Image (spheres, grey):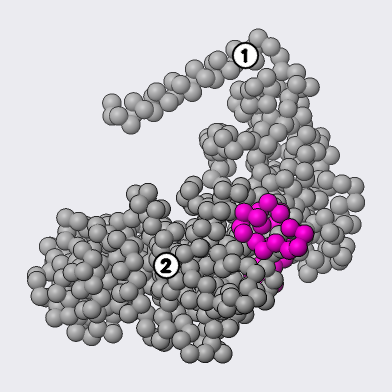
Amino acid sequence: MTAVGVEEELAICRRMAYMRAMASVFDRAEVSLREVEVRPARADERRRWDALMAAHHYLGFRQFAGRGLRHVAVWRGHWLALVGWQSGAFKCAPRDRWLGWHRSVQFRRLHLIGNNTRFLILPEAAGTRNLASRTLGPSLRRLSADWRAAHGRPLELAETFVDPSRFRGVSYAASNWRRVGRTKGFARHNGAYTDPHSVPKEMFVRPLRSDAAARLSDPVDRAEWSCRATPVRYAGAELRSLRDLFAAAPDSRRGQGRKHGLATVLSICALARLAGQRGPAATERFARGLEQRELRALGAWRDADGRCVPPSDSTICRVLADTDPDALADVLRQWAAPRRAESSDLPALAADGKRIRGANRHAGDGACFETATLVTHGGRPLASRCCRDEGGETAAVRALLDDVDLRGCAITLDALHACADTERAIVDVHGADYALDVKANCPDAFAQLQAIDWDASTVRRHVDGPAKAHGRIETRRIAARDLLPDTFASFAHARQAFRVIRERTVVKTGTPSAETAYGITSANAERAGPDRLLAWNRGHWQVENGNHCRRDVAFGEDASRIRARHAPANNATLNNIALPSSSTAASATCPMRTSTS
């Protein structure tokens, strides 16, 4: 028997022993429904909840669609049943007819509906009389309060779908749910309900208050429906460490009339970003909500009464406009240095530039137009540089490489950086490797790559996929082969050439497409086989998806209306500093935390 077979046998034996032990418990003492407690699953119980639901529910379980909430029914320490809630269905004709709400109201109120997407009586408790009703009742009674505690909003209505070929919905009817109709048997796919699954469901709803339908269909919003942010209070040591981080940046403002130190203002700007506040006015409102002890730890100016006064929006504007972007970029490098030393996932880094929207309008001489950022393939920024000349991204990236110890790393770059100067900077100066896309902007090298016999027996190959994501099925194929020295006149250190073919099929229409890309790398076959080259090629997009896109979406960088002098560039650098702290993968030693809603 193979090792896998042995593990499966042991798992089955353990499972059977567990079920026998549980059965003996239920044989010795009949479950008293009055002793059954329904409560949210704790953070350390989520994996167990997910595993049990995936193993025993006929639909399985991977994750919730949107927001989710896990309830568990417990009797004398034993789990009897699991209830899973998630965000309400985007569209459902029976529910929408029953509510009678207008379409414009519907999309504003969907967050007030919770969908009972999973309900499971565990095998050990199967046959316990009235357990389903005893579980659903308390779960419904505490649902709105638990949802508000977890997600900042209450719920007005609960809904669920019942497969009539399997169940009759007796438990829901016993808990005063209302049947409102049957669905047509279509699932949502790529934003449209056009994917037939041929399993119409019965829909049940349960108002969580007597006037829920009237409230949901009322055109006037209610104050209690708005999301209430949970304020995050910071320890004094955390705030002082954040202020010390920015203390290295020189203050270019005049000393006359200056009240707030540069480190204080920049620290408040970084904290405001983590709280979801954008722009100087929003930052000022955030600062006014800080406690006196927090303002003291940040070094805020004190008035005649000894009270700390937060900076105004005009002060914040002046600081962002006058601070040297290179000095603030040095702060990012110093902040990232210890975290880079602690990290073990840095064999591949990606470098790319991003245009600062609006930076060329009324900016004056010496203003920056682009930022070049060096990130890990997980999207965590390590260093940033500003470009003062349009089109100066290649020079900025070469300067950026001087800020980080690159020994043993591989740098992935797009075709814009396919030049001899960048190659020499990476290999000769920094002792690193590169993986570089080559396109028609290097016509000689591109023609040589196209002329290679990619079907030869000496070519190494690897296939990744097929995988389904973003409404399409994609397969990636890579072919790599060794290169002789001096194969390319412009790239003396190239040791391998590779070709990547991305084959995609749109699931909804079945339309196929294919894309071919070429590249070179200084890494030999021992260091980077075709599987690693493909991972590097795909991981390079983290600089776009994990950094540029998140700066635009989370912090509204492209939507910012900041235009004065260096303010757009400094705004981008502050976003880079705050970005890792807003991620669940942030380092535990980071001096900033994200506020939750």
385 vs 543, nearest the viewer: 385
Q: Which residue is mark 2?
A: 330
The residue that appears at 21% across and 79% down in the rendered structure is 420
**How many dots with numbers?**
2
Q: Is residue 35 magenta?
A: no
The residue that appears at 74% across and 48% down in the rendered structure is 148
Residue 487's disc is none
Pinpoint residue 489: horizontal percent, then vertical percent.
14, 81
Q: Nearer the viewer, mark 1 or mark 2?
A: 2
Q: Quadrant of residue 223?
A: bottom right
For this view, does 80 lie left or right of residue 190?
right
Q: Crowdedness of circle 2 by 10 Å Cα count: few (<14), some, many (20+)?
A: some
The residue that appears at 61% across and 47% down in the rendered structure is 235
Kindly tell me whether residue 334 is visible in this rendering: yes
Q: Is residue 293 magenta?
A: yes
Q: Residue type at mark 2: give it.
A: Asp
Residue range in magenta is 278-306
Q: Crowdedness of circle 1 by 10 Å Cα count: few (<14), some, many (20+)?
A: some
Q: Is residue 567 above or below residue 363?
A: above
Q: Residue type at mark 1: give it.
A: Val
- CA–CA distance between discs 1 and 2? 64 Å
Q: Is residue 272 above or below residue 586?
A: below
Q: Which residue is mark 1?
A: 25
- Under circle 1, the secondary element is helix
Q: Is residue 290 above or below residue 448?
A: above
